[in-house]
Image (spheres, coloured by chain):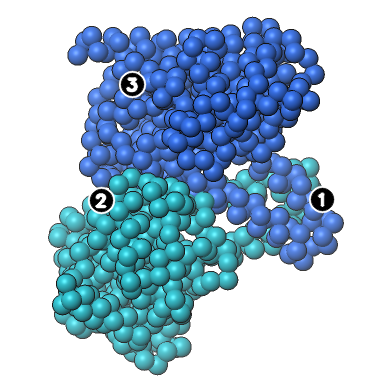
Chain colours: A cyan, B blue
Amino acid sequence: MKIAVDTMGGDYAPKVVVEGVERARNEFSDLEFLLFGDQEQIKKYLQDSKRITVVHTKSEILGTDEPMKAIRKKKDSSMVLAAQAVKDQKADALFSLGNTGALMAAGIFIIGRLKNIARPALMPTLPAMSDQPGICYLDAGANAEVKVSYLEQWAVMASFYAREVLGVAKPRVGLLNNGSEYDKGDRLHQEAYQALKELASVNFVGNVEADNLLKGVADVVVTDGFTGNAVLKATEGSVKILISQLKQALLTQGLRSKLGALLAKPALKSIKDTFDVSAYGGAVLMGVKAPVVKSHGSSDARTIYYALVQLRLMYNKGMLMQVMTYFDQQKKES
Amino acid sequence: MKIAVDTMGGDYAPKVVVEGVERARNEFSDLEFLLFGDQEQIKKYLQDSKRITVVHTKSEILGTDEPMKAIRKKKDSSMVLAAQAVKDQKADALFSLGNTGALMAAGIFIIGRLKNIARPALMPTLPAMSDQPGICYLDAGANAEVKVSYLEQWAVMASFYAREVLGVAKPRVGLLNNGSEYDKGDRLHQEAYQALKELASVNFVGNVEADNLLKGVADVVVTDGFTGNAVLKATEGSVKILISQLKQALLTQGLRSKLGALLAKPALKSIKDTFDVSAYGGAVLMGVKAPVVKSHGSSDARTIYYALVQLRLMYNKGMLMQVMTYFDQQKKES
């Protein structure tokens, strides 16, 4: 399997990307890489070029670039050329930690939508406060406006992912909604409830409220991209605020500061571990023709390594093939 | 001023309600109360009946009751009769900590919508991580589906509230959206952005993303009730999870448990204080003919006391009259 890697996005690129790639290459003998980016910078960090080909690119898409414009204009950027390599079947999967909107656009317009899929969705895996291996959450922001049929397709695709990549035998699917009863939410969510309930191929367990999201009441949670994005940001925002409050409290609330700092460390580390999603890799662009994963711009080499493992699993388990077969079958039957 | 109080909802009713009422009565000589509920239970806790009239009621609306059905069928419930007293001008304001949906229905269908207001909204005040006196946040869940014109009315009403009740000279109004640029979100939010920008009577400061909500970038944040509800629950949910994680971490992460508990206390208290909204009272049902406030079912006497102070301020400042005058004027001009 060959992975096309956009090395230029993110806060610590290309250093951490090269480190993550080398770790994955060392661990898995079936992995090869095409690294797109500034050749000089990449080679500064690359220790061993075994199964790694560097493709020099002249420009890079910035976090501030307008996504659609960026992929149209910056044809020689590391992201566009990496996506192009997947389209041209020179690589099997795409990884980037650059501009999320641009990567979605590159995935959809360069690599292309998977057959029969109306709208690809962005799917991070969220940490669960239970012993399940994380919560597949989509759409996290690719589609502000949705139809019931999109939610159905996302539920099916994420169920395949939870089974094949996370190893959940019978993934429980929930609908993010503002109440647990079937008649909660606006018309769209009421209709989505019924549609998901009647969808034989998913194990629908009902509505999930945002305050229960991380508790682990479902393995897959589907939502429109507008609410999905807002809830994710609210969760991240309050976790950040609380951690900073906690730091301050432990350091100043009548404790000698050294003792406070000493004691704060394990507590903060434990909380960080709980909310640590780096082992999940990154967010999958679900519904395009190849595995595409986006990691956070501030990712370290470890997170990037896990994202590459995630792409490998998606590919080796033939997840997208299964999805395609399912929707082909569906279409024939309808 | 006379406040109609539904004493029967909530986890510790009517005890904490009676205590909160007595504290407010002792503090403010202009306050009188009508307490609706089980006479025997109320009298058990009531120490002094000065300026307090108890009205015995035979039934109560439960948290599990379907709101519309409850206010139609339970005509002799403490909540319905308290709302009826406001409608009949036997009281000037309504307080309850019972079923939120039922209270919204009682406010809208018994007390009635304020003239020219299309849809009342539920408005809690959120804690701000800045030195501003809280964030007026609406709609928190009364209207899953909205129009741009509702958002405009809510922005205006909440600005009056922030000025009169919170004392903010020139309230900054934000729109909850999934990006800071003007073209973010679905069509509704893009249109709302333009409409709020052009609304001369509010000080619109642009989009507010959910992860910035509590940072205090605006004094008023308007949102549709579906997203508003989900974001609020996500925030509450993650705060709860983090606090429980923190407790566990401080008690078990290699610390002797007694020392851990000792150290955890001030840290937890400090965080609790930061997120403490009891001083804000409760959520206002904004857009009905009288001040209506709902406090959380688990409220203590202190929170209820603050909610009564909040009703008193809304009434004494003539806030609703100002809102009415504004919309009357608007209508004449259009």
Whether callout 2 and callout 1 share a subunit is answered no
Position of residue A225 relative to residue B157, above or below, is below
Measured in 3D between alpha carbons, the distance from the residue under mark 2 to the one under mark 3, in whole angstroms, is: 27 Å
Q: Are marks 3 and 1 on the same chain?
A: yes
| Image x and y of residue B142, in percent | 41, 35
Tell me the residue that label 2 is attached to: A145
Whether residue A19 is visible to the viewer of this picture, yes or no, is no
In the image, taking residue A101 as reference, residue B129 lies left or right, namely right
At x 35%, y 30%, the residue is B205
Q: Position of residue A287 (x, y in %)?
A: 26, 69
What is the quadrant of the C terminus of chain B in the image?
top left
Marked residue nearer the N-terminal end (3 or 1): 3
**Badge 3: few (under 14), some or many (20 or more) residues near its Cα, within 10 Å?**
some
User: As rendered, which of B300 and B215 lies closer to the eye?
Assistant: B300
Residue at coordinates 82% horizontally, 60% vertically from top-left? B257
User: Secondary structure under badge 3?
Assistant: loop
Mark 3 in CB contact with mark 1 (< 8 angstroms): no
Helix, strand or loop for disc 2? loop
Label disc, if present, on residue B313 of the rendered structure? none
Q: Tag 3: residue type?
A: Ile
Q: Chain letter of disc 1?
A: B
Q: Position of residue B317 (x, y in %)?
A: 51, 10
Which of the 4 image quadrants contains residue B227? top left
Q: Position of residue A91 (x, y in %)?
A: 24, 82
Q: Which residue is mark 1?
A: B262
Identify the chain of the residue marked 3, using the numbered disc in the image. B
Mark 3 or 1: in front is 3
Q: CA distance from mark 3 to mark 1?
A: 52 Å
Packing grade of label 1 (10 A; few <14, some 14-19, many >=20) is few
Q: Secondary structure at mark 1?
A: helix
